[in-house]
Image (tube, grey):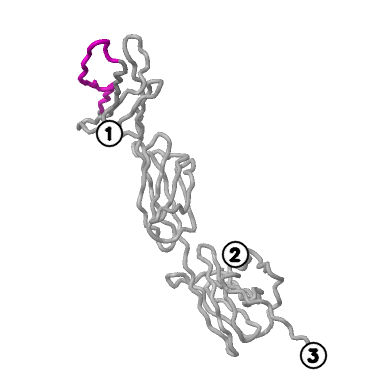
């Protein structure tokens, strides 16, 4: 009996998009599964590659592959977005298009005996760019950490501002994001931003200076550092802004403060009073516990 050739296992289009898109993203196409075969005269597949707004996408790379992942043909779109290549015969194929500034697109096409007209629509990738500046002087802030998160709080991108305060992120999904910016000596800033469907969204982050108040609480004429003292910071309206408890060295600190008038109040433990009756030999073990309010 004659041997029946066993066909290669069929791979889904999604499984072959990555290696073909990488191979066609720039320069000469290289098929990582096996060497490209020469395109034979067959059934023509042609059309136009367009962007989201209908504009033609010139220089887009269009690659025809088999369901097994073999590259069968490749075309580069003309200035009007038109492309054309030949399928070796009737059957199902995968058509992949990619271009700078656009998300790769893979489609399954069914080719018959007649030429197939098939237009390709590419979705543009979105970017985010901006500048970090000091709010008071408008001077650029170098080295600021910029973090982009989505509505679920997942981090999409991170980076630091450059010498001119600039930052840039590409390949972002359009939609609502939060841009958080922080830098030494400035108060953290969070901005809601809507990333557009195509192109680069530009923002400017103005950081307010973060004032610092710090010092040491000392006790008595000996100027001994007083540990465990309660220090309260009160603004001009009488609101408690922050509280701190000194360490063993008597030190306290308040950071990220707005400019303005404040009062600093330092206290030790409040007095504790209790009734005590002494008779006979007296009382042994009358312990007293001191604590700050709320503890």
Residue mark closest to the camera, 3 vs 2: 3
State which quarter of the image contains the N terminus: bottom right
* Residue linked to disc 3: 1
Residue 52 is drawn in which quadrant?
Answer: bottom left
Q: Is residue 146 left or right of residue 116?
A: left
Distance between mark 3 and mark 2 Cα atoms: 47 Å
Tag 3, which secondary structure? loop
On residue 241, the disc is: 1
Question: Magenta span has 30?
Answer: no
Q: Tell me where residue 132 appears, x and y as whole percent.
A: 41, 43
Distance between mark 1 and mark 2 Cα atoms: 55 Å
**Going from the N terminus, do you reach mark 3 or mark 1 first?**
3
Residue 85 is drawn in which quadrant?
Answer: bottom right
Q: Residue furthest right?
A: 1
Q: Tell me the residue at 40%/20% (across/down).
A: 249
- Give the residues in magenta: 262-283
Q: Tell me the residue at 36%/29% (across/down).
A: 212
Residue 221 is drawn in which quadrant?
Answer: top left
State which quarter of the image contains the C terminus: top left
* Residue linked to disc 2: 25
């Amino acid at each position: 009996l004659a041997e029946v050739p066993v066909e290669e296992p069929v791979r889904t289009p999604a499984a072959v998009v990555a290696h073909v898109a990488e191979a066609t993203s720039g320069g000469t196409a290289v098929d990582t599964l096996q060497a490209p075969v020469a395109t034979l005269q067959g059934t023509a597949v042609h059309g136009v590659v367009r962007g989201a707004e209908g504009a033609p996408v010139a220089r887009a790379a269009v690659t025809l592959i088999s369901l097994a992942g073999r590259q069968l043909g490749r075309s580069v779109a003309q200035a009007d977005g038109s492309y054309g290549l030949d399928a070796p015969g009737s059957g199902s194929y995968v058509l992949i298009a990619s271009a700078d500034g656009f998300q790769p697109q893979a489609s399954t096409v069914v080719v018959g005996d007649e030429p197939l007209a098939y237009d390709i629509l590419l979705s543009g990738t979105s970017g985010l760019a901006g500048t970090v500046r000091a709010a008071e002087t408008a001077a650029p802030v170098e080295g600021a950490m910029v973090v982009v998160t989505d509505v679920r709080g997942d981090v999409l991108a991170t980076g630091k501002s450059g010498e001119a305060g600039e930052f840039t992120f590409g390949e972002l999904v359009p939609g609502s994001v939060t841009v958080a910016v922080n830098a030494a000596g400035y108060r953290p800033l969070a901005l809601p931003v809507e990333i557009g469907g195509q192109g680069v969204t530009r923002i400017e982050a103005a950081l307010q200076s973060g004032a610092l108040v710090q010092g040491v609480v000392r006790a008595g004429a000996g100027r001994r550092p007083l540990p465990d003292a309660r220090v309260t910071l009160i603004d001009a309206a009488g609101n408690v802004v922050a509280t701190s408890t000194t360490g063993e060295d008597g030190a306290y600190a308040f950071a990220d403060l707005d400019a303005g008038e404040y009062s600093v109040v330092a206290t030790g433990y409040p007095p504790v009073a209790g009734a005590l009756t002494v008779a006979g030999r007296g009382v042994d073990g009358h312990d007293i516990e001191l604590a700050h309010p709320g503890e």
